[in-house]
Every structure is written in C-alpha cells, then in structure tokens.
Image (spheres, rainbow, N blue to C red):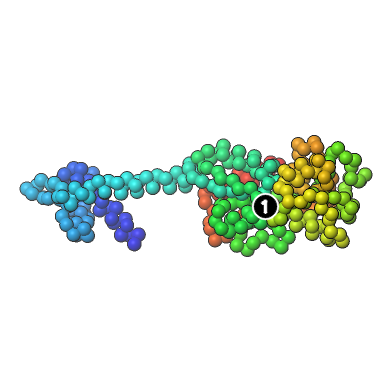
Amino acid sequence: MERVDRLTLQQLRYFLAVADTKHFTRAAEQAGVAQPSLSKQVQSLESELGTPLFSRVRGNVTLTPAGEALLPIARRILADVDTARHEVAELVGLRRGRLRVGATPSLCASVFADVLARFHAAYPGIRLLVEEGGSRDLSRSLLRGDLDLALIIVPPEGPDPALTTRVVLREDLMVASAASLPPLVNRPTIRLIDLRDRPMVMFRQGYDLRETTLQACRGVGYEPRLAVEGGEMDAVLRFVEAELGVAIVPSMVLANRPGLRGIPVAPPGLSRTVALAHRTDVPPTNAARAFSEVLMEHVATL
C-alpha cells in the first residue's frame, strides 16, 4: 500500500508537470526524470482513471475534459501533502505542537511552575495544556490517553504496571502547624504519636497525602482526629494557618509561607517519591522527551 501511495503522488506530479509545460520532454527535464519514464507514469495514471488526460495531436499537448477536471484536484492534493510534510517537520523539530502534562497541586505550586517556564522559553511553539490533580486522578488521565506526561507520587505498592515512571526526586514530609501558635514540641523533630490528640486537617479522597497520613498514624496505633477534611493543597495550608489543625505536607510547600511552621518527623521520618510517568504502550513524543530533560535539568539545580 505504501508503494502505491508514493506511485500515485508521483503520477500526479508528472501529470502537473506536463499540464504546466504542455510538453512531455520539457516536463521530464523539469521533473528530473527520463522522458520515457514520465510518459509511462502518465499512461499508468490514465489507465487507472480509465480515460485520456492529454490530447496529443501533431506535437501539441492539451488537456482533455478529464484532464481539466483532474488539474485543480491534483494541485490541491499535492499542496495538502506538502503542508502535511511541513507540519510534521515542524513538530519533529519542536517548533510546533501540543504537550498535555499533569502534576499534583503541591508540585504545581513549587517545582512544576519553574519547569514549565524553562520549557516554554526553550520551545515557545509547543502549546502546554496543564492538568492539576491528585496522583491517582492523574494516573487515570494518563491511562485514558488524556495526558502525555504527569508528575505523580509513587504509591507504596509501586506504580501502575501500565505506566512507565522515571524517578525525579524524593522529598521529606513535615508536620505543618500555625506559626501563630506555640511550637508543637520543644524538640527538632516530632514523633507521629505526638499528634494523637491534635486535630488534623486532611486532604480529600484520592489525594496521595491523605493515604500517607492515615497509614502513618495507623502504623503507630491510632486513628487521627480530623477537624477538617476534603481540601486541596492550598486550602489545607490555609486551614492550618487559621489554627484549625495540623497537617502532614511536603517540605517544599512551606517555602514562603510565614504563617506556617514546619517540623520534620522523627526518624525514620516520612518521605515520598516523585516520578514522571507516561503510558508504557505509547512512546513519548519528541516534545515529551524534551520536557523530561528540561525537568531533570531543573531538578538537578535544586
């Protein structure tokens, strides 16, 4: 089939060359092919269409009614093919295109924004579409084909086998409290058991930090006392600032938040692994690979 497609385009180009020059020899010279080869391809096209395209009388070459009808169609087809080649070449060269990326709210508020800025500066022709959500929601979007890449938190049981992941960073989790209140403990670290009787602000269902917090508290023998639940990252941080409770959050979201105080969890501590994910059965596009490299270069500078 591929050979037939190329042959058809070649036939149309030879047909146009003859139509424009009204001469088979000059058309062959213009096309850079031997005149017998060009004539043979035109005859094959006429045979395929079932009608003569040129009238050849005493050396004069003119279009038949069928040739006149084919002429604008052939020009449009070849113009569309040239346009398609140009579009693809620009996309391959990262001059144009679209990249759909996702990240969790905590990453959007920290590392992700800087990466997007660096990528846009390097590839301004690539249109970026961003989805913000919890890791589980982002993983589902990847599997549905709604995203090309996503920064997700790797769950304790490991990523979905249908996703390919590349570890980006490992981040410590801290206990956040309102800076307007006294410190939670008079030590440089806090034990999870110290939070047993403190009200907690909890993320919504589907948030990886919700499951991490619940599992950590249950791991030391208690069910956390929830004061407020159901929020996204920014809402949770604001609720903590408003003295509604404490929350376990990534260390990077506490930067430039003077209304919050963060304290590390006592050894062995709590951490999370951030990875860049894509569908295993769909090879990353050039734009996706370029984004991955920009991301890793940025993380290396942190």
Residue at position x 80%, y 37% in the image: 259
Residue at position x 19%, y 56% in the image: 46
Residue 15 visible in image:
no
Q: Is 224 located above or below residue 262 in the figure?
A: below
Residue 10 percent across, percent down from the top left: 28, 52
The residue to which callout 1 is attached is 134
Q: What residue occupies the far right of the structure in this picture? A: 186
Q: What element carries label 1?
A: loop
Quick check: 72 left or right of 296? left
Q: Quadrant of the C terminus?
A: top right
Q: Quadrant of the N terminus?
A: bottom left
Residue at position x 71%, y 58% in the image: 155
Q: What residue occupies the far left of the structure in this picture? A: 58
Residue 7 percent across, percent down from the top left: 29, 56
Residue 271 percent across, percent down from the top left: 77, 52
Q: Residues within 10 Å of mark 1 (few under 14, many from 20)?
A: many
Residue 278 percent across, percent down from the top left: 59, 55
Residue 181 or residue 253, whichever sits in front: 181
Residue at position x 72%, y 46% in the image: 233
Residue 163 or residue 241, whichever sits in front: 241
